[in-house]
Image (tube, helix red, strand yellow):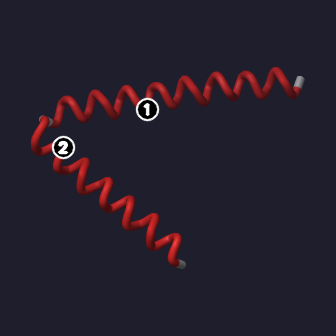
Amino acid sequence: MQVTWLETDIFTAGLGFLMLSVRYSGLTNILSLLVLLISLFMVWSLLFGTEAMVKVK
């Protein structure tokens, strides 16, 4: 139980920090950063997915 509460606290703190950064540095910078992170994650998962398929075959 304590671990989940700690995780939720960290998550809410991260959300609060994100809101503050959005307010002070501008929405477009944060959105472009999020898009970049999401695209990098998708490319990463695609690469690892194909790698796992090749290893299985």
Question: The disc labelled 2 sits on which kind of residue?
Answer: Ser
Q: Does residue 18 appear to the left or right of 5 in the view shown? A: left
Question: The disc labelled 1 sits on which kind of residue?
Answer: Ile
Residue 31 lies in quadrant: top left
Mark carried by residue 21: 2
Name the spot of residue 15 as percent of width and height, x first. 29, 54
The residue that mark 1 highlights is 38
Name the spot of residue 49 as percent of width and height, x first. 69, 28
Q: Does residue 39 appear to the left or right of 18 in the view shown? A: right
Residue 43 lies in quadrant: top right
The image shows residue 15, relative to residue 29, as above or below, that is: below
Name the spot of residue 46 as percent of width and height, x first. 62, 25
Q: In the rendered view of the protein, which quadrant contains the C terminus? A: top right
Q: Residue at x 41, y 31 (%)?
A: 37
Q: Residue at x 32, y 62 (%)?
A: 12
Please identify the residue farthest to the bottom as the structure is shown.
1
Between disc 2 and disc 1, the foreground one is 2
How crowded pointer 2 is (Cα within 10 Å; few <14, some 14-19, many 20+) is rated as: some
